[in-house]
Amino acid sequence: MNYDLIVIGGGSGGVRAARIAAGYGAKVALIEEYRLGGTCVIRGCVPKKLMVYASRFAIEFEESRGYGWIMDELRFDWATLVKNRDQEVDRLEKVYRGNLEKSGVHIFEGHARLVDANTVVVDEKDKLSAKTLLIATGAQPVTDTRVRGHELCIDSNEFFKLPTQPKRVVVQGSGYIALELACVLHHLGSEVHLVYRSDLVLRGFDEELRHQLTEELKLSGMRLHQGQLIANVTKGPQELEIRLDNGMALKADVVLKAIGRKPNTENLGLEELGVELNDQGAIAVNEWSQTNLPNVYAVGDVTNRVNLTPMAIREGHAFADNVFGGKAITVNHGLVPTAVFTTPELGTVGLTEEQALALYPRLDIYKSSFRPLKATVSGHTSRTFFKLLVNRDNDEIVGFHSIGPDTGEMSQLIGIALQMKATKAAFDATLAVHPTAAEELVTMRSPSMQHGL
C-alpha cells in the first residue's frame, strides 16, 4: 500500500501531523500499537488532571468550614473516580479516532518497524510505503533495574491501573510527574513518603520556586526524604518493605517510581536504517524536525527537545505545514509556558533567575508573597507567590514564576505577554482587577532585588 506520508505513533504530535497533512491533500497512514491519543490523553495529562481535581476537593471541603458550611460526613470512593475518569478517556480516544477518519487518514493498529527509508511493516504483516515518514512514538517511564526489587514497583503508566487506593505509598522522584501523583494520593488521604536524591524538588525550575514548593509540600503533611534513593524493595507478609540509602526502613502498599522518561526508539528498526540518535537515545533532528535521512522526520518526546504535549502538537503541525503545505515554519522551543499541577500548583514561563542573570546582568526582580483572600477566612496556611524578572536595559519582562491557585492559568496568559515582549511599564499601566490574586502582577511597583547596579 502506497502513501504520501506514514506516521508512526498516534499521540498528540502524530495525530496533528496526520490530520494537517491530510488536509493538504496527502494520502496518510497512521500506525499506533496501543491507543489513540498517546500518553497525554490515555495515561498522562488528562486523566492526571481529573485526579488532581478530585484530590483538591478535600481542601475545598475543609476550607468551607470557615465559611459556615457544616460537613458531617465525607467519604471518597476511588472506584467511582476511576470509572468516571476512564469513561472520559474512552470518549476522548473516540474523538481522536473520529477526527482522523473524517480527515481521511488510514489507521493501522499494531507495531511498526522501518524496513528502509520508505517502507514500514506493521506486526510483520502489512507492508506500507511512502515518500515521507514521520516518527512520533513519544516516551516511556524509566525503570532502574539496578535496584533490588524493582519489579515490585509500579511506574506512572501503572498508576492509572490501580484498582484500589493504596493507604501507604512511597514515591521516588522529584520531577513534575512524581510530584503531581504524590500530591493526588496525599490529598485523597493516602500516607505518602516522597524520596528524592536532590536537596530540592523540580530540577531545572527557578531556584526560588523550588524552595517555595518544597516548603509547601512539607506544610501539607507529606513526608519528604531528600538526598535519598531507594536501596531495595522486598515483599513482606502484608506490605512492601523499603530500605533507603541511609538505612531508614519504610513500609507501603505501593512503591511508585517516577524517575524520568526515555524516548520510545527501541524495536523500530532505526539503528539498522542508520537514523541518528543522540546521547540520550532520542532521535536527532534539525530545526525542521528532519533526521539525517532527508525523508524521515520525528516530532514530540521521541526527540527529547521540550517534552510537553502542546510542543508535540506544534512540532507536528509545523512539519505538515512545511512538507505538505509549502510553508517554511520553525518552532520556538525557547518560550514555553508551563504548569505543574501539584497542590499548590505552579505556573512559569520564560527564563529562570539564574538564566536571566547570565543574559541580562542588569536584572530587576519583583516578588510578592501573600495569603489569598479566601484563606483569611478559611484559615488555610498556603501562600501565593509571584516573581517577575525584568531586563532593566529595555524594561522587558523575561520571566514569570508563580505558585498558588490557578497559577497554571496565569502562565498561559503571561506567556502571550512575553511573546509580545511586554514591558514592566505596560504591566504597571494595566488596571488591576480587584480583589484577585493576579492583580499583584500589575501592582508590584518596587523591585525586591536589583542586580548590576
Image: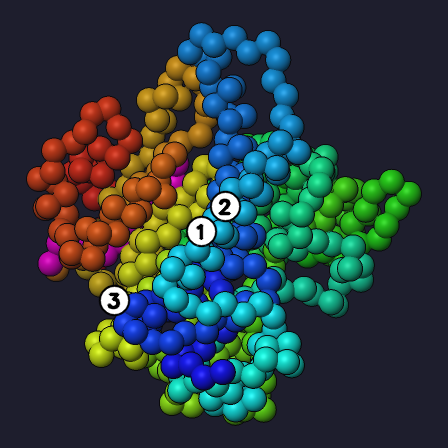
Residue 296 appears in the rendering: no
- On the image, the x and y values in percent for residue 25 come to 30, 74
Q: Quadrant of residue 287?
A: bottom left
Query: What residue is disc 2 on?
Result: 91
Is 387 on the left or on the right of 187, as rendered? left
Judge whether residue 208 is colored magenta.
no
- For image coordinates 12% across by 60% down, the residue present is 393
Is 413 on the left or on the right of 382, as rendered? left
Three-letter amino acid code at disc 2? Arg
Residue 322 appears in the rendering: yes
Q: Say which label, 3 or 2, has the lower sequence index.
A: 2
Secondary structure beneath disc 3? helix
In what quadrant of the picture does the C terminus appear?
bottom left
Pointer 1 local density, CA inside 10 Å: few below 14, some 14–19, many at least 20:
some
Q: Disc 3 or disc 1, which is closer to the eye?
A: 1
**Residues at discs 1 and 2 in contact (Cβ within 8 Å):** yes
Magenta residues (range): 394-404
Is 161 on the left or on the right of 373, as rendered? right
Query: What residue is disc 1 on?
Result: 95
Secondary structure mainly formed by the magenta segment? strand
- On the image, the x and y values in percent for residue 63 come to 47, 19
In this view, 90 is above or below 258: above
Query: What residue is disc 3 on?
Result: 359
- For image coordinates 33% across by 34% down, the residue present is 369
- On the image, the x and y values in percent for residue 3 come to 42, 81
**Residues at discs 3 and 2 in contact (Cβ within 8 Å):** no
